[in-house]
Image: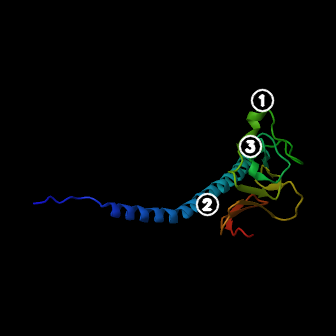
C-alpha cells in the first residue's frame, strides 16, 4: 500500500501566490488614500487644537493670546503660509502686529509661549486668510487684515488631492471654529 502524501503542489502554490499578488495590487491604492486622509485629518486637528488652546489661554490668563504663522517656531512670519508651522503665545502688543517672545532661554519666553507646532508634512499646503489671529481676554477674535467679514478660513490640502480630501477650517469673530471636508476643485 502506498502512503498518501499531504501538501500543496507547485501549481497550487503558484496560483495562490498570483491571487494574493493581485489582491495586494488592488488594495495598495486604497491603503495609500487612507493614509493620506489620516495625515490630512491629523494636520487639520493640530491647527484646530492650537486655535482652541489659544482661546482657552486668553480666557484663563485674562490677556490676549495670538496664533501666528511661523517658520522658526519662535517668531511670527509675515506670511499666510501656515504650512511652515505656527506659534501660540501671550501677546503683549495688544494691537498691531503681534510680538512673539524671541529668546528661548529667557523667563519672558517661558511665561508667554504657549505652544509651537512644526511644519505640516511634505506634500501638504495650509494657507490662511491672515498672518495672525488674536484672541482677546473675552474670547473674541481679531485678525491681521481689516476685513469686515465675520469669518476667516484656512484651506488644508495635499498635492495628490482627490475627491473630498481638502479641509476648510473656518473661524468667526466670537472664536467659533468649524472644519469641513471639501472637494479638491474648490
Say which residue appears at 75% left-offset and 57% top-offset.
175
Label 3 element class = helix
- Measured in 3D between alpha carbons, the distance from the residue under mark 2 to the one under mark 3, in whole angstroms, is 36 Å
Q: Quadrant of the N terminus?
A: bottom left
Instruction: Give percent across and percent down for residue 45.
Output: 65, 55
Q: Which residue was labeled with disc 2?
A: 37
Mark nearer the viewer, 2 or 3: 2
Instruction: Give percent across and percent down for residue 183.
Output: 69, 70
Q: Which residue was labeled with disc 1?
A: 106
In primary-sequence order, the first of circles 1 and 3 is: 3
Q: How crowded is mark 1: few (under 14 residues within 10 Å), some or many (20 or more)?
A: few
Camera-side residue of 75 and 35: 35
Say which residue appears at 55% left-offset and 64% top-offset.
30
Q: Which residue was labeled with disc 3?
A: 61
Say which residue appears at 76% left-offset and 53% top-offset.
139
In the image, 48: left or right of 133? left
Camera-side residue of 114 and 83: 83
In the image, 78: left or right of 26? right
Question: Residue 15, located in which quarter of the rendered image?
Answer: bottom left
Label 2 element class = helix
Q: How crowded is mark 2: few (under 14 residues within 10 Å), some or many (20 or more)?
A: some
Q: In which quarter of the image is the C terminus?
A: bottom right
Q: Do the residues labelled 1 and 3 touch (CB within 8 Å)?
A: no
Mark nearer the viewer, 2 or 1: 2
Amino acid at each position: 500500500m502506498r502512503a498518501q502524501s499531504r501538501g500543496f503542489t507547485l501549481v497550487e502554490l503558484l496560483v495562490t501566490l498570483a491571487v494574493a499578488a493581485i489582491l495586494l495590487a488592488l488594495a495598495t491604492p486604497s491603503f495609500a488614500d487612507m493614509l493620506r486622509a489620516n495625515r490630512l485629518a491629523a494636520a487639520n486637528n493640530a491647527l484646530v487644537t492650537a486655535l482652541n488652546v489659544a482661546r482657552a489661554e486668553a480666557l484663563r490668563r485674562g490677556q490676549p493670546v495670538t496664533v501666528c504663522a511661523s517658520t522658526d517656531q519662535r517668531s511670527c512670519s509675515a506670511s499666510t503660509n501656515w504650512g511652515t508651522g505656527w506659534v501660540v503665545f501671550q501677546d503683549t502688543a495688544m494691537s498691531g502686529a503681534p510680538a512673539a517672545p524671541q529668546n528661548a532661554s529667557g523667563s519672558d519666553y517661558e511665561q508667554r509661549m504657549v505652544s509651537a507646532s512644526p511644519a505640516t508634512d511634505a506634500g501638504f499646503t495650509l494657507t490662511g486668510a491672515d498672518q495672525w489671529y488674536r484672541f482677546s481676554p473675552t474670547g473674541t477674535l481679531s485678525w491681521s487684515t481689516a476685513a469686515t467679514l465675520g469669518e476667516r478660513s484656512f484651506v488644508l490640502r495635499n498635492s495628490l488631492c482627490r475627491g473630498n480630501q481638502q479641509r476648510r477650517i473656518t473661524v468667526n469673530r466670537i472664536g467659533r471654529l468649524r472644519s469641513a471636508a471639501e472637494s479638491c476643485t474648490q
